[in-house]
Amino acid sequence: MKKLFVVLSVIFVSAIASGNNLSTIPKSYAEALKGLDIKGAELNNSFLSVSFNREQISKEMLGSVVRGFCYQMFLDKKFAKTLDLKRVMITNRHYSHSFNFETDVKQYCTNISKLTDEEIKQQFPFDRYVTEN
């Protein structure tokens, strides 16, 4: 849990409050992404592309995006019913490096919602769904 806090702290330290270009995605999606250092986001059917305002990106940053959607599902049952993401991609600010999370996000969040961190690692390891480009 301490490691998760450190990772999230690093990600949130340089958050941009008003400069994010999240106007092209639904409000509930933007709510799940708020607080992250995001340059912009685009939703195309069930594919969400998020560009971070950084040179370097990591799988941990992709994990924070997915966890944001899982948390939003937990908070908002209406959002949980409408969430339809099959792929989430994050890129750096120059679009030269990316990570993809390729699975049904709603189902993934539902599967892990009642598990401990150790059970999640054993049954639904995050890395299984991630590719890097």
Image: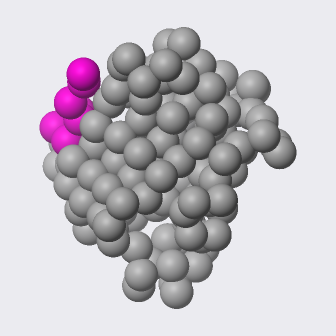
Measuring 32% from the left and 30% from the top, which residue is drawn there? 99
- Residue furthest to the right: 18
Assess whether residue 130 is covered by the magenta stretch: yes
**For this view, does 99 lie left or right of residue 122?**
right
List the single residue furthest toward the top. Answer: 55
Residue 94 sits above or below residue 123 on the image? above
Residue stretch in magenta: 126-133
- The answer to which image quadrant residue 71 occupies is bottom right
Question: Residue 91's image quarter?
Answer: top left
Position of residue 53 measured from the top left corner of the image (x, y, whole percent): 62, 26
Q: Nearer the viewer, residue 119 or 100?
A: 100
Quarter holding residue 54: top right
**Total tally of numbered discs in the picture:** 0
Q: Nearer the viewer, residue 38 or 68?
A: 38
Q: Is residue 44 above or below residue 27?
A: above
**Residue at left offset 26%, top offset 68%:** 107
Horizontal and vertical percent for residue 131?
Answer: 21, 30
